[in-house]
Amino acid sequence: MMTQSLQNGFTLDNHYLRDLKGPVPVPTQYAPSLGVHRGSCPVEPHKDQEIQRHRSAQAAPLLGSCRVQTPAPMDVQMCQSIQPCHADHQGDLSAGQLLKWMDTIACLAAERHAGMACVTLSMDDIQFEETGRVGQVITIKSKVNRAFTTSMEVGIRVSVQDVREHVERLVCVAYSTFVGKPAGPQKVLLRPVEDLCSAEEQLQHSLASERRRLRLYNEQTFNSLLPSKSFQRVGVCSRRDPLSAVSTEFTRVESIELVLPPHANHHGNTFGGQIMAWMENAATVAASRLCGCFPSLRSVDMFRFRGPSSVGDRLVFKAVVNNTFNNSIEVGVRVEAYNCEEWTANKPRHINSAFLIYQLANTPGDVPAFPQVTYTTQDGERRYLSAIVRKRIRMARKHILSCKEEAPLSVPWDKSNQVYLGYNNVAALTVLAGKQDWEASSISDRVAVYVHEEVELLCVQVQMEVMTSALHAFTLLADLTLRPLWDKHYLSCEEVERADEEETVYHIKCPPINGGKSRDFVFLLSKRQPCKDGDPYVVALRSVTVTTVPPVEGFLRSEAKCAGFLIHSLGLNSCKVRQTHQHTDCLRHSLGHPCSLALYDFVLAFSFT
Protein backbone atom coordinates (compact mmCIF):
# COMPACT_ATOMS: atom_id res chain seq x y z
CA MET A 1 0.00 0.00 0.00
CA MET A 2 1.20 3.48 -0.68
CA THR A 3 0.31 6.67 1.08
CA GLN A 4 -1.10 9.40 -1.17
CA SER A 5 -0.91 12.96 0.13
CA LEU A 6 -4.07 14.73 -0.92
CA GLN A 7 -4.43 18.34 -2.01
CA ASN A 8 -7.17 18.96 0.54
CA GLY A 9 -4.92 18.06 3.43
CA PHE A 10 -5.88 14.45 4.14
CA THR A 11 -3.85 11.24 3.79
CA LEU A 12 -5.15 7.88 2.64
CA ASP A 13 -3.88 4.49 1.51
CA ASN A 14 -5.07 3.22 -1.85
CA HIS A 15 -3.29 0.57 -3.88
CA TYR A 16 -5.13 1.62 -7.05
CA LEU A 17 -3.30 4.95 -7.07
CA ARG A 18 0.07 3.25 -7.53
CA ASP A 19 -0.69 2.93 -11.22
CA LEU A 20 -0.56 6.69 -11.60
CA LYS A 21 3.06 6.80 -10.51
CA GLY A 22 4.46 4.64 -13.30
CA PRO A 23 6.31 5.77 -16.42
CA VAL A 24 4.29 8.23 -18.45
CA PRO A 25 4.58 8.28 -22.24
CA VAL A 26 4.85 11.85 -23.47
CA PRO A 27 4.39 13.14 -27.02
CA THR A 28 7.90 13.90 -28.16
CA GLN A 29 7.05 17.29 -29.61
CA TYR A 30 6.17 18.55 -26.11
CA ALA A 31 8.80 16.74 -24.07
CA PRO A 32 11.75 19.08 -24.71
CA SER A 33 9.86 22.31 -23.98
CA LEU A 34 8.29 20.93 -20.81
CA GLY A 35 11.48 19.35 -19.52
CA VAL A 36 10.10 15.81 -19.42
CA HIS A 37 12.63 12.99 -19.17
CA ARG A 38 12.41 9.29 -18.65
CA GLY A 39 15.23 8.31 -16.32
CA SER A 40 18.25 10.39 -17.22
CA CYS A 41 17.59 10.56 -20.97
CA PRO A 42 15.10 12.60 -23.00
CA VAL A 43 12.05 10.83 -24.39
CA GLU A 44 12.88 9.22 -27.70
CA PRO A 45 10.43 9.36 -30.62
CA HIS A 46 10.04 5.61 -30.87
CA LYS A 47 9.71 4.84 -27.17
CA ASP A 48 5.93 5.14 -26.98
CA GLN A 49 5.41 2.61 -29.79
CA GLU A 50 7.86 0.20 -28.15
CA ILE A 51 6.04 0.50 -24.83
CA GLN A 52 2.67 -0.21 -26.46
CA ARG A 53 4.03 -3.30 -28.27
CA HIS A 54 5.64 -4.52 -25.06
CA ARG A 55 2.36 -4.10 -23.20
CA SER A 56 0.49 -5.98 -25.89
CA ALA A 57 2.87 -8.93 -25.53
CA GLN A 58 2.51 -8.86 -21.73
CA ALA A 59 -1.24 -8.46 -21.75
CA ALA A 60 -1.98 -11.19 -24.31
CA PRO A 61 -1.64 -14.25 -22.02
CA LEU A 62 -3.64 -12.53 -19.25
CA LEU A 63 -6.53 -11.31 -21.36
CA GLY A 64 -7.63 -14.69 -22.66
CA SER A 65 -10.81 -14.39 -24.65
CA CYS A 66 -10.68 -10.59 -24.47
CA ARG A 67 -7.83 -10.60 -26.96
CA VAL A 68 -9.79 -11.33 -30.13
CA GLN A 69 -8.80 -10.84 -33.75
CA THR A 70 -11.58 -8.33 -34.49
CA PRO A 71 -12.25 -6.23 -31.39
CA ALA A 72 -15.75 -4.95 -30.76
CA PRO A 73 -16.43 -1.26 -31.41
CA MET A 74 -15.26 0.83 -28.48
CA ASP A 75 -17.93 3.53 -28.73
CA VAL A 76 -20.77 3.37 -26.21
CA GLN A 77 -23.76 5.68 -26.54
CA MET A 78 -26.71 6.56 -24.32
CA CYS A 79 -29.78 8.62 -25.29
CA GLN A 80 -32.15 9.95 -22.65
CA SER A 81 -35.25 12.08 -22.83
CA ILE A 82 -35.08 14.67 -20.07
CA GLN A 83 -38.10 14.20 -17.81
CA PRO A 84 -39.27 16.42 -14.91
CA CYS A 85 -37.74 13.92 -12.47
CA HIS A 86 -34.33 14.62 -14.04
CA ALA A 87 -34.57 18.42 -13.68
CA ASP A 88 -33.89 20.91 -10.91
CA HIS A 89 -36.25 23.56 -9.59
CA GLN A 90 -35.66 25.74 -12.68
CA GLY A 91 -36.48 23.02 -15.20
CA ASP A 92 -32.84 22.50 -16.22
CA LEU A 93 -31.22 19.08 -16.29
CA SER A 94 -29.78 18.41 -12.85
CA ALA A 95 -25.99 18.29 -12.86
CA GLY A 96 -26.14 15.40 -10.40
CA GLN A 97 -28.36 13.37 -12.73
CA LEU A 98 -26.03 14.09 -15.64
CA LEU A 99 -23.02 12.95 -13.62
CA LYS A 100 -24.83 9.64 -12.92
CA TRP A 101 -25.36 9.01 -16.61
CA MET A 102 -21.80 10.03 -17.47
CA ASP A 103 -20.28 7.65 -14.92
CA THR A 104 -22.49 4.82 -16.15
CA ILE A 105 -21.60 5.24 -19.81
CA ALA A 106 -17.88 5.67 -19.05
CA CYS A 107 -17.83 2.50 -16.96
CA LEU A 108 -19.51 0.52 -19.75
CA ALA A 109 -16.97 1.76 -22.30
CA ALA A 110 -14.11 0.81 -20.00
CA GLU A 111 -15.53 -2.66 -19.38
CA ARG A 112 -16.05 -3.23 -23.10
CA HIS A 113 -12.37 -2.54 -23.71
CA ALA A 114 -11.06 -4.49 -20.70
CA GLY A 115 -13.50 -7.38 -20.95
CA MET A 116 -14.02 -7.36 -17.19
CA ALA A 117 -15.36 -5.29 -14.32
CA CYS A 118 -13.66 -1.90 -13.96
CA VAL A 119 -13.19 0.57 -11.13
CA THR A 120 -13.27 4.37 -11.46
CA LEU A 121 -10.17 6.14 -10.19
CA SER A 122 -11.01 9.70 -11.16
CA MET A 123 -12.99 11.99 -13.42
CA ASP A 124 -11.14 15.12 -14.54
CA ASP A 125 -11.54 18.18 -16.75
CA ILE A 126 -15.34 18.19 -16.54
CA GLN A 127 -16.46 21.34 -18.39
CA PHE A 128 -20.15 22.27 -18.62
CA GLU A 129 -20.81 24.47 -21.65
CA GLU A 130 -24.58 24.67 -21.21
CA THR A 131 -27.42 22.52 -19.90
CA GLY A 132 -30.47 20.66 -21.16
CA ARG A 133 -34.10 21.29 -20.33
CA VAL A 134 -37.18 19.15 -19.83
CA GLY A 135 -38.40 17.78 -23.15
CA GLN A 136 -35.00 17.76 -24.84
CA VAL A 137 -32.96 14.68 -25.73
CA ILE A 138 -29.53 14.20 -24.20
CA THR A 139 -26.91 12.07 -25.98
CA ILE A 140 -23.84 10.78 -24.14
CA LYS A 141 -20.98 9.13 -26.03
CA SER A 142 -17.92 7.56 -24.45
CA LYS A 143 -14.86 5.80 -25.77
CA VAL A 144 -11.50 4.60 -24.45
CA ASN A 145 -8.98 7.12 -25.75
CA ARG A 146 -5.89 5.30 -24.58
CA ALA A 147 -4.93 2.32 -22.44
CA PHE A 148 -1.73 2.49 -20.43
CA THR A 149 -0.18 -0.43 -18.57
CA THR A 150 -2.96 -0.94 -16.02
CA SER A 151 -5.17 2.13 -16.43
CA MET A 152 -7.14 3.68 -19.27
CA GLU A 153 -8.63 7.08 -20.10
CA VAL A 154 -12.26 7.21 -21.21
CA GLY A 155 -13.45 10.32 -23.03
CA ILE A 156 -17.04 11.44 -22.49
CA ARG A 157 -18.99 13.86 -24.70
CA VAL A 158 -22.50 15.05 -23.89
CA SER A 159 -24.76 16.89 -26.34
CA VAL A 160 -28.38 17.99 -26.27
CA GLN A 161 -30.94 18.31 -29.05
CA ASP A 162 -34.42 19.80 -29.08
CA VAL A 163 -36.98 17.43 -30.59
CA ARG A 164 -37.96 20.19 -33.04
CA GLU A 165 -34.40 20.84 -34.12
CA HIS A 166 -31.79 18.83 -35.98
CA VAL A 167 -28.69 20.49 -34.51
CA GLU A 168 -26.88 19.13 -31.47
CA ARG A 169 -25.34 21.52 -28.95
CA LEU A 170 -22.38 20.57 -26.78
CA VAL A 171 -23.24 20.29 -23.08
CA CYS A 172 -20.21 18.75 -21.44
CA VAL A 173 -16.84 17.09 -22.01
CA ALA A 174 -15.02 14.99 -19.41
CA TYR A 175 -12.30 12.36 -19.03
CA SER A 176 -12.38 9.42 -16.61
CA THR A 177 -9.61 7.08 -15.51
CA PHE A 178 -10.43 3.39 -14.95
CA VAL A 179 -8.55 0.24 -13.95
CA GLY A 180 -9.57 -3.36 -14.26
CA LYS A 181 -10.98 -4.81 -11.03
CA PRO A 182 -8.46 -7.45 -9.96
CA ALA A 183 -9.51 -10.80 -8.59
CA GLY A 184 -6.37 -10.95 -6.45
CA PRO A 185 -3.44 -8.78 -5.45
CA GLN A 186 -2.01 -8.60 -8.98
CA LYS A 187 -3.02 -5.69 -11.21
CA VAL A 188 -4.84 -6.29 -14.48
CA LEU A 189 -2.81 -5.52 -17.60
CA LEU A 190 -4.75 -3.83 -20.39
CA ARG A 191 -4.31 -4.23 -24.12
CA PRO A 192 -3.52 -1.01 -26.00
CA VAL A 193 -6.10 0.84 -28.07
CA GLU A 194 -5.60 -0.05 -31.71
CA ASP A 195 -7.14 0.72 -35.10
CA LEU A 196 -7.11 4.49 -34.73
CA CYS A 197 -8.78 5.40 -38.00
CA SER A 198 -9.78 9.06 -37.78
CA ALA A 199 -7.62 12.09 -37.11
CA GLU A 200 -9.72 12.88 -34.04
CA GLU A 201 -9.03 9.43 -32.56
CA GLN A 202 -5.30 9.85 -33.13
CA LEU A 203 -5.39 13.31 -31.58
CA GLN A 204 -7.23 12.14 -28.45
CA HIS A 205 -4.89 9.15 -28.20
CA SER A 206 -1.93 11.55 -28.10
CA LEU A 207 -3.58 14.07 -25.77
CA ALA A 208 -4.54 11.32 -23.31
CA SER A 209 -0.86 10.81 -22.57
CA GLU A 210 -0.37 14.57 -22.23
CA ARG A 211 -3.33 14.91 -19.85
CA ARG A 212 -1.99 12.06 -17.72
CA ARG A 213 1.46 13.61 -17.59
CA LEU A 214 0.02 16.99 -16.65
CA ARG A 215 -2.02 15.47 -13.83
CA LEU A 216 1.14 14.09 -12.28
CA TYR A 217 3.05 17.31 -12.94
CA ASN A 218 0.25 19.36 -11.38
CA GLU A 219 0.33 17.25 -8.23
CA GLN A 220 4.05 17.93 -7.88
CA THR A 221 3.55 21.62 -8.65
CA PHE A 222 0.77 21.92 -6.09
CA ASN A 223 2.78 20.27 -3.35
CA SER A 224 5.84 22.41 -4.11
CA LEU A 225 4.02 25.74 -4.33
CA LEU A 226 1.61 25.55 -1.41
CA PRO A 227 4.16 25.26 1.42
CA SER A 228 6.21 28.11 -0.07
CA LYS A 229 7.00 30.77 2.52
CA SER A 230 7.02 33.43 -0.15
CA PHE A 231 3.50 32.35 -1.13
CA GLN A 232 2.36 32.69 2.46
CA ARG A 233 3.66 36.21 2.88
CA VAL A 234 2.42 37.65 -0.42
CA GLY A 235 -1.01 39.30 -0.53
CA VAL A 236 -2.65 36.80 -2.84
CA CYS A 237 -5.86 38.65 -3.64
CA SER A 238 -6.73 42.31 -3.56
CA ARG A 239 -10.48 41.67 -3.37
CA ARG A 240 -10.52 40.58 0.24
CA ASP A 241 -11.84 43.23 2.64
CA PRO A 242 -11.93 41.90 6.22
CA LEU A 243 -14.74 44.27 7.15
CA SER A 244 -17.16 43.11 4.44
CA ALA A 245 -15.89 39.60 3.69
CA VAL A 246 -17.91 36.52 4.69
CA SER A 247 -16.16 33.78 6.62
CA THR A 248 -15.96 30.51 4.71
CA GLU A 249 -17.03 28.75 7.93
CA PHE A 250 -20.51 30.19 7.34
CA THR A 251 -20.83 28.06 4.18
CA ARG A 252 -20.09 24.70 5.77
CA VAL A 253 -22.59 21.97 4.90
CA GLU A 254 -22.75 18.44 6.28
CA SER A 255 -25.17 15.86 4.95
CA ILE A 256 -25.57 12.12 5.49
CA GLU A 257 -26.93 9.40 3.22
CA LEU A 258 -27.61 5.73 3.90
CA VAL A 259 -26.55 3.49 1.01
CA LEU A 260 -29.51 1.28 0.02
CA PRO A 261 -29.69 -1.52 -2.61
CA PRO A 262 -30.94 0.85 -5.38
CA HIS A 263 -27.75 2.89 -4.85
CA ALA A 264 -25.42 -0.06 -5.60
CA ASN A 265 -23.91 -0.86 -8.99
CA HIS A 266 -23.70 -4.25 -10.69
CA HIS A 267 -20.53 -5.06 -8.71
CA GLY A 268 -22.19 -4.64 -5.32
CA ASN A 269 -20.44 -1.36 -4.42
CA THR A 270 -22.03 2.06 -4.13
CA PHE A 271 -22.62 3.45 -7.61
CA GLY A 272 -19.97 6.10 -8.27
CA GLY A 273 -22.39 8.28 -10.21
CA GLN A 274 -24.74 8.32 -7.22
CA ILE A 275 -21.93 9.49 -4.95
CA MET A 276 -21.07 12.21 -7.44
CA ALA A 277 -24.70 13.35 -7.51
CA TRP A 278 -24.82 13.55 -3.72
CA MET A 279 -21.54 15.49 -3.72
CA GLU A 280 -22.91 17.96 -6.27
CA ASN A 281 -25.99 18.51 -4.12
CA ALA A 282 -23.95 19.29 -1.00
CA ALA A 283 -21.63 21.61 -2.94
CA THR A 284 -24.57 23.51 -4.47
CA VAL A 285 -26.07 24.10 -1.01
CA ALA A 286 -22.72 25.44 0.27
CA ALA A 287 -22.38 27.79 -2.70
CA SER A 288 -25.98 29.00 -2.38
CA ARG A 289 -25.39 29.86 1.28
CA LEU A 290 -22.74 32.33 0.20
CA CYS A 291 -24.44 34.03 -2.74
CA GLY A 292 -28.11 33.74 -1.69
CA CYS A 293 -29.16 31.99 -4.91
CA PHE A 294 -28.45 28.79 -6.81
CA PRO A 295 -25.34 29.25 -8.99
CA SER A 296 -24.60 27.14 -12.06
CA LEU A 297 -22.03 24.35 -12.00
CA ARG A 298 -19.40 25.11 -14.65
CA SER A 299 -16.63 22.58 -14.03
CA VAL A 300 -15.45 19.84 -11.70
CA ASP A 301 -11.81 19.41 -10.80
CA MET A 302 -10.10 16.35 -9.32
CA PHE A 303 -13.00 13.98 -8.74
CA ARG A 304 -11.09 11.26 -6.89
CA PHE A 305 -12.44 7.84 -5.90
CA ARG A 306 -10.14 6.73 -3.11
CA GLY A 307 -11.94 3.70 -1.75
CA PRO A 308 -15.16 1.68 -2.08
CA SER A 309 -18.33 1.71 -0.03
CA SER A 310 -21.17 -0.79 -0.01
CA VAL A 311 -24.84 -1.19 0.86
CA GLY A 312 -25.47 -0.34 4.49
CA ASP A 313 -22.67 2.24 4.75
CA ARG A 314 -23.37 5.73 6.05
CA LEU A 315 -21.88 8.37 3.79
CA VAL A 316 -21.17 11.79 5.29
CA PHE A 317 -20.71 14.66 2.82
CA LYS A 318 -18.78 17.71 4.02
CA ALA A 319 -18.81 20.75 1.71
CA VAL A 320 -17.39 24.24 2.20
CA VAL A 321 -16.56 27.24 0.01
CA ASN A 322 -12.79 27.44 -0.32
CA ASN A 323 -12.45 30.77 -2.13
CA THR A 324 -14.19 33.15 -4.53
CA PHE A 325 -12.77 34.88 -7.59
CA ASN A 326 -14.01 37.57 -9.96
CA ASN A 327 -16.67 35.40 -11.57
CA SER A 328 -16.34 31.95 -10.04
CA ILE A 329 -16.36 30.12 -6.73
CA GLU A 330 -14.62 26.90 -5.65
CA VAL A 331 -16.36 24.48 -3.31
CA GLY A 332 -14.51 21.52 -1.81
CA VAL A 333 -16.37 18.31 -0.94
CA ARG A 334 -15.10 15.42 1.16
CA VAL A 335 -16.93 12.10 1.53
CA GLU A 336 -16.46 9.82 4.53
CA ALA A 337 -17.92 6.31 4.82
CA TYR A 338 -18.83 4.34 7.96
CA ASN A 339 -20.02 0.79 8.42
CA CYS A 340 -21.86 -0.11 11.62
CA GLU A 341 -18.72 -0.69 13.69
CA GLU A 342 -16.97 2.41 12.33
CA TRP A 343 -20.09 4.49 12.96
CA THR A 344 -20.12 3.51 16.61
CA ALA A 345 -16.37 4.04 17.02
CA ASN A 346 -16.43 7.28 14.95
CA LYS A 347 -13.65 6.02 12.64
CA PRO A 348 -14.45 7.24 9.11
CA ARG A 349 -12.97 6.12 5.80
CA HIS A 350 -12.19 8.91 3.34
CA ILE A 351 -13.53 7.56 0.04
CA ASN A 352 -14.06 10.59 -2.23
CA SER A 353 -13.12 14.22 -2.71
CA ALA A 354 -13.65 16.84 -5.42
CA PHE A 355 -13.58 20.56 -6.13
CA LEU A 356 -16.59 22.05 -7.91
CA ILE A 357 -16.48 25.41 -9.71
CA TYR A 358 -19.66 27.52 -9.87
CA GLN A 359 -20.64 30.70 -11.70
CA LEU A 360 -23.63 33.01 -11.42
CA ALA A 361 -26.02 33.12 -14.34
CA ASN A 362 -25.60 36.25 -16.45
CA THR A 363 -28.54 38.61 -16.26
CA PRO A 364 -28.93 41.61 -18.61
CA GLY A 365 -27.44 44.75 -17.13
CA ASP A 366 -25.85 43.02 -14.14
CA VAL A 367 -22.24 42.07 -13.58
CA PRO A 368 -22.18 38.73 -11.74
CA ALA A 369 -19.94 38.76 -8.70
CA PHE A 370 -19.67 36.57 -5.65
CA PRO A 371 -19.39 38.03 -2.16
CA GLN A 372 -15.86 38.31 -0.84
CA VAL A 373 -14.77 35.61 1.58
CA THR A 374 -12.11 35.35 4.24
CA TYR A 375 -10.86 32.65 6.59
CA THR A 376 -10.97 32.53 10.36
CA THR A 377 -9.17 29.25 11.03
CA GLN A 378 -5.84 27.72 10.06
CA ASP A 379 -7.63 25.08 8.00
CA GLY A 380 -9.62 27.81 6.28
CA GLU A 381 -6.40 29.60 5.35
CA ARG A 382 -4.98 26.40 3.88
CA ARG A 383 -8.09 25.86 1.77
CA TYR A 384 -8.15 29.54 0.74
CA LEU A 385 -4.56 29.43 -0.54
CA SER A 386 -4.96 25.98 -2.09
CA ALA A 387 -7.89 27.22 -4.18
CA ILE A 388 -5.69 29.94 -5.69
CA VAL A 389 -3.02 27.42 -6.67
CA ARG A 390 -5.59 25.08 -8.21
CA LYS A 391 -7.13 27.92 -10.22
CA ARG A 392 -3.74 28.78 -11.72
CA ILE A 393 -3.12 25.13 -12.53
CA ARG A 394 -6.54 24.82 -14.19
CA MET A 395 -5.95 27.94 -16.24
CA ALA A 396 -2.53 26.86 -17.47
CA ARG A 397 -3.68 23.29 -18.15
CA LYS A 398 -6.64 24.50 -20.20
CA HIS A 399 -4.46 26.52 -22.56
CA ILE A 400 -1.66 23.94 -22.64
CA LEU A 401 -4.07 21.25 -23.87
CA SER A 402 -5.86 23.46 -26.37
CA CYS A 403 -5.58 21.72 -29.73
CA LYS A 404 -7.18 24.24 -32.07
CA GLU A 405 -5.32 24.97 -35.27
CA GLU A 406 -3.73 28.39 -35.16
CA ALA A 407 -3.21 30.78 -38.03
CA PRO A 408 0.20 32.46 -38.27
CA LEU A 409 0.53 35.36 -35.85
CA SER A 410 3.13 37.24 -37.87
CA VAL A 411 2.19 39.87 -40.44
CA PRO A 412 4.38 40.75 -43.44
CA TRP A 413 6.56 43.78 -42.78
CA ASP A 414 6.37 46.45 -45.43
CA LYS A 415 8.01 49.80 -44.90
CA SER A 416 5.48 51.47 -47.17
CA ASN A 417 2.75 50.27 -44.81
CA GLN A 418 4.54 51.10 -41.57
CA VAL A 419 2.00 53.73 -40.46
CA TYR A 420 -0.83 51.20 -40.50
CA LEU A 421 1.25 48.44 -38.84
CA GLY A 422 2.57 50.80 -36.16
CA TYR A 423 -0.90 52.13 -35.37
CA ASN A 424 -2.32 48.59 -35.06
CA ASN A 425 0.61 47.55 -32.87
CA VAL A 426 0.10 50.39 -30.38
CA ALA A 427 -3.71 50.18 -30.46
CA ALA A 428 -3.71 46.41 -29.81
CA LEU A 429 -1.53 46.80 -26.72
CA THR A 430 -3.57 49.73 -25.39
CA VAL A 431 -6.85 47.86 -25.81
CA LEU A 432 -5.42 44.70 -24.26
CA ALA A 433 -4.07 46.52 -21.21
CA GLY A 434 -7.38 48.38 -20.83
CA LYS A 435 -9.54 45.25 -20.62
CA GLN A 436 -11.81 44.94 -17.61
CA ASP A 437 -11.95 42.09 -15.09
CA TRP A 438 -8.20 41.66 -14.59
CA GLU A 439 -8.01 39.28 -11.66
CA ALA A 440 -5.34 39.84 -9.02
CA SER A 441 -3.14 36.77 -8.92
CA SER A 442 -0.68 38.08 -6.36
CA ILE A 443 0.22 41.45 -4.89
CA SER A 444 3.34 42.37 -2.92
CA ASP A 445 5.00 45.63 -1.99
CA ARG A 446 6.84 45.82 -5.33
CA VAL A 447 5.13 43.55 -7.87
CA ALA A 448 1.49 42.81 -8.73
CA VAL A 449 0.47 40.06 -11.15
CA TYR A 450 -2.94 40.05 -12.85
CA VAL A 451 -4.55 37.49 -15.15
CA HIS A 452 -7.32 37.94 -17.71
CA GLU A 453 -8.88 34.85 -19.27
CA GLU A 454 -11.35 34.52 -22.11
CA VAL A 455 -12.48 31.49 -24.12
CA GLU A 456 -9.45 31.44 -26.44
CA LEU A 457 -7.32 34.09 -24.81
CA LEU A 458 -5.03 34.18 -21.81
CA CYS A 459 -3.36 37.45 -20.85
CA VAL A 460 -0.92 38.21 -18.05
CA GLN A 461 -0.05 41.64 -16.75
CA VAL A 462 2.77 42.44 -14.34
CA GLN A 463 2.83 45.83 -12.62
CA MET A 464 5.89 47.20 -10.84
CA GLU A 465 6.84 50.53 -9.33
CA VAL A 466 10.35 51.60 -10.35
CA MET A 467 12.45 54.28 -8.68
CA THR A 468 13.46 56.11 -11.83
CA SER A 469 11.85 58.60 -14.13
CA ALA A 470 9.31 57.42 -16.69
CA LEU A 471 11.44 58.80 -19.51
CA HIS A 472 14.51 56.85 -18.35
CA ALA A 473 12.50 53.61 -18.09
CA PHE A 474 11.02 54.26 -21.54
CA THR A 475 14.48 54.80 -23.04
CA LEU A 476 15.80 51.50 -21.63
CA LEU A 477 12.77 49.39 -22.60
CA ALA A 478 12.42 50.88 -26.09
CA ASP A 479 15.96 49.93 -27.16
CA LEU A 480 15.97 46.13 -27.43
CA THR A 481 19.68 46.05 -28.28
CA LEU A 482 20.32 46.89 -24.61
CA ARG A 483 18.23 44.01 -23.29
CA PRO A 484 20.95 41.29 -23.43
CA LEU A 485 22.97 43.41 -20.97
CA TRP A 486 20.41 43.02 -18.18
CA ASP A 487 17.89 40.37 -19.32
CA LYS A 488 19.05 36.74 -19.15
CA HIS A 489 16.23 35.71 -21.49
CA TYR A 490 17.91 37.50 -24.41
CA LEU A 491 20.96 35.86 -26.00
CA SER A 492 21.28 38.57 -28.62
CA CYS A 493 19.27 41.28 -30.32
CA GLU A 494 20.06 42.79 -33.72
CA GLU A 495 18.41 45.73 -35.40
CA VAL A 496 17.08 44.54 -38.77
CA GLU A 497 15.51 47.70 -40.14
CA ARG A 498 14.69 51.14 -38.75
CA ALA A 499 11.72 52.68 -40.52
CA ASP A 500 11.83 55.90 -38.49
CA GLU A 501 12.31 57.03 -34.90
CA GLU A 502 9.16 55.20 -33.77
CA GLU A 503 9.18 51.89 -35.70
CA THR A 504 12.07 49.43 -35.66
CA VAL A 505 12.33 45.73 -36.59
CA TYR A 506 14.52 43.53 -34.37
CA HIS A 507 15.75 39.93 -34.57
CA ILE A 508 15.97 38.38 -31.08
CA LYS A 509 17.55 35.08 -30.06
CA CYS A 510 16.58 33.44 -26.77
CA PRO A 511 18.15 30.55 -24.83
CA PRO A 512 16.36 27.21 -24.43
CA ILE A 513 13.83 26.78 -21.62
CA ASN A 514 13.49 23.53 -19.66
CA GLY A 515 15.79 21.68 -22.02
CA GLY A 516 13.93 22.70 -25.18
CA LYS A 517 15.29 24.28 -28.36
CA SER A 518 16.60 27.81 -28.57
CA ARG A 519 14.07 30.22 -30.03
CA ASP A 520 14.20 33.36 -32.10
CA PHE A 521 11.70 36.14 -32.84
CA VAL A 522 11.34 38.91 -35.38
CA PHE A 523 9.57 41.81 -33.68
CA LEU A 524 8.23 45.13 -34.83
CA LEU A 525 8.73 47.58 -31.97
CA SER A 526 6.52 50.66 -31.97
CA LYS A 527 7.19 53.33 -29.34
CA ARG A 528 5.14 56.39 -28.50
CA GLN A 529 5.67 59.25 -26.06
CA PRO A 530 2.71 60.81 -24.19
CA CYS A 531 0.58 63.27 -26.14
CA LYS A 532 -0.65 64.97 -22.96
CA ASP A 533 -0.22 64.83 -19.21
CA GLY A 534 -1.47 61.56 -17.76
CA ASP A 535 -0.88 59.51 -20.91
CA PRO A 536 1.64 56.65 -20.61
CA TYR A 537 4.78 55.96 -22.59
CA VAL A 538 4.09 53.00 -24.90
CA VAL A 539 6.44 50.26 -26.10
CA ALA A 540 4.47 47.77 -28.26
CA LEU A 541 5.74 44.52 -29.79
CA ARG A 542 4.34 42.06 -32.30
CA SER A 543 5.79 39.45 -34.64
CA VAL A 544 6.40 40.31 -38.30
CA THR A 545 7.76 38.44 -41.29
CA VAL A 546 10.86 39.88 -42.98
CA THR A 547 12.29 38.24 -46.09
CA THR A 548 15.84 39.20 -45.10
CA VAL A 549 15.56 37.20 -41.83
CA PRO A 550 14.78 33.57 -42.73
CA PRO A 551 14.53 30.87 -40.04
CA VAL A 552 17.88 30.20 -38.40
CA GLU A 553 19.23 26.65 -38.12
CA GLY A 554 19.20 25.47 -34.53
CA PHE A 555 16.49 27.95 -33.50
CA LEU A 556 12.73 27.50 -33.42
CA ARG A 557 10.99 30.54 -34.96
CA SER A 558 8.30 31.67 -32.51
CA GLU A 559 5.66 34.38 -32.61
CA ALA A 560 3.71 36.79 -30.42
CA LYS A 561 0.58 38.67 -31.38
CA CYS A 562 0.60 41.40 -28.77
CA ALA A 563 3.04 42.34 -25.99
CA GLY A 564 4.69 45.39 -24.55
CA PHE A 565 4.97 47.99 -21.81
CA LEU A 566 2.93 50.97 -20.63
CA ILE A 567 4.93 53.33 -18.42
CA HIS A 568 3.06 55.80 -16.18
CA SER A 569 4.87 58.65 -14.47
CA LEU A 570 4.36 58.87 -10.69
CA GLY A 571 6.78 61.72 -10.06
CA LEU A 572 10.19 63.03 -10.99
CA ASN A 573 12.01 59.86 -9.90
CA SER A 574 9.34 57.16 -9.89
CA CYS A 575 7.06 55.44 -12.39
CA LYS A 576 4.79 52.42 -12.73
CA VAL A 577 5.60 49.90 -15.47
CA ARG A 578 2.84 47.59 -16.76
CA GLN A 579 4.04 44.66 -18.84
CA THR A 580 1.22 42.94 -20.73
CA HIS A 581 1.37 39.81 -22.87
CA GLN A 582 -1.34 37.96 -24.80
CA HIS A 583 -1.30 34.22 -25.37
CA THR A 584 -3.62 32.56 -27.81
CA ASP A 585 -5.29 29.12 -28.02
CA CYS A 586 -2.17 26.98 -28.11
CA LEU A 587 -0.08 28.07 -25.16
CA ARG A 588 2.71 25.59 -25.77
CA HIS A 589 3.80 27.60 -28.86
CA SER A 590 4.38 30.65 -26.65
CA LEU A 591 6.44 28.99 -23.95
CA GLY A 592 9.69 30.43 -25.22
CA HIS A 593 8.50 34.01 -25.58
CA PRO A 594 11.03 36.41 -24.02
CA CYS A 595 8.18 38.48 -22.57
CA SER A 596 6.35 35.52 -21.09
CA LEU A 597 9.34 33.63 -19.60
CA ALA A 598 7.63 30.30 -20.15
CA LEU A 599 4.10 31.28 -19.18
CA TYR A 600 3.08 27.91 -17.76
CA ASP A 601 5.72 28.18 -15.04
CA PHE A 602 5.14 31.94 -14.94
CA VAL A 603 1.43 31.58 -14.14
CA LEU A 604 2.12 28.95 -11.51
CA ALA A 605 5.28 30.23 -9.90
CA PHE A 606 6.45 33.68 -10.96
CA SER A 607 4.03 35.50 -8.69
CA PHE A 608 5.42 33.70 -5.65
CA THR A 609 8.96 35.01 -6.09
Image: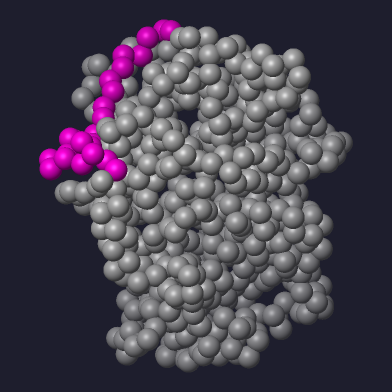
Q: Which residues are magenta?
A: 62-85
- Can residue 84 be seen by looking at this rendering? yes
Q: Is residue 113 above or below residue 168?
A: below
Q: Is residue 73 covered in magenta?
A: yes
- Residue 233, image x, y percentages: 82, 57
Q: Residue 283 falls in which quadrant of the image?
A: top right
What kind of colouring is applied to the model shown? one colour
Task: Tell me if 240 is positioned left or right of 94 in this view.
Answer: right
Residue 358, picture quadrant:
top right
The residue nearer to you, when weighing 117 against 234, is: 117
Nearer to us in this view, 157 or 561: 157
Q: From this view, report whether residue 258 is shown above or below residue 569.
A: above
Quarter the N terminus occupies: top right
**Residue 560's spot in the image, x, y percent?**
44, 69
User: Where residue 319 appears, x then y in whole percent?
Assistant: 67, 27
Left or right, 113 with respect to 293, comes to left
Q: Residue at x 55, y 84 (%)?
A: 490
**Residue 433 vertical position relative to residue 338 in the rendered view, above or below:** below
Image label count: 0
Q: Residue at x 70, y 29 (%)?
A: 320
Q: Is residue 451 magenta?
A: no
Q: In the depicted view, which residue is nearer to us: 564 or 533?
A: 564
Residue 425 in view (yes/no)? no
Task: Single out the residue that lies furthest toward the left.
Answer: 70
| Residue shown at the point (72%, 77%) measured from the top left | 470
**Residue appearing at x 55%, y 90% in the figure:** 481
**Residue 312, image x and y in percent?**
57, 12
Look at the image and tell me in which quarter the C terminus lies: bottom right
In the image, 18 versus 381, the foreground residue is 18
